[in-house]
Amino acid sequence: MTEPLHPPGETPPVEGSTADAHPPQPDGVIWEHPRVWLSLIVIGCLLVAGFFVVRILGP
């Protein structure tokens, strides 16, 4: 019995696939900008530290 034909670009089940497991995400997704996350964390830390400085130096 002959094997069924596979559509072009599809890997037969007995062969290993060299294609990517997931399609690449488009440019500009939020995870590609670690500086944004770092700046938000730093600003948050400065706000919390500033709160305590004001409490210590306040009236």
Image (tube, rainbow, N blue to C red):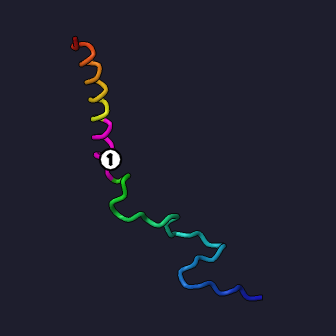
On the rendered image, what quadrant is the C terminus found in? top left
Q: Secondary structure at mark 1?
A: helix
Displayed quadrant of residue 6: bottom right
Q: Quadrant of the N terminus?
A: bottom right
Residue drawn 73% across the image and 88% down it: 2
The residue lying toward the viewer, choosing from 58 and 30, is: 58
Determine crowd level at label 1: few under 14, some 14-19, many 20+ residues with C-alpha closer than 10 A.
Answer: few
Taking the image as shown, residue 24 lies to the left or right of residue 44, namely right
Residue position marked by numbered label 1 in the rendering: 34
Q: From this viewpoint, which residue is outermost toward the front?
A: 59
Q: Quadrant of residue 3?
A: bottom right
Query: In percent of the image, x 28 and y 45: which residue is there?
Result: 35
Part of the protein shown in magenta: 33-41
Residue 32 locus on image (x, y percent): 34, 54
Q: What residue type is disc 1 on?
A: Pro
Name the outermost residue toward the right: 1
- Residue 17, percent across and down? 56, 70
| Residue at the image point whose x is 66% and y is 73% from the top | 14
| Relative image position of residue 25 (x, y in whole percent) | 41, 63
Examine the structure image and report whether residue 46 is included in the region drawn in magenta.
no
**Residue 24, relative to residue 51: is it above or below?**
below
Is 42 positioned to the left or the right of 12 in the image?
Answer: left
* Most distant residue in the top direction: 59
User: Relative to 3, is 10 on the left or the right?
Assistant: left
Q: Is residue 59 above or below residue 5?
A: above
Residue 30 lies, in percent from the top left, at 36, 53
Residue shown at the point (27%, 16%) measured from the top left: 55
In-front residue for pair 22/16: 22
- As displayed, is residue 26 above or below residue 51? below
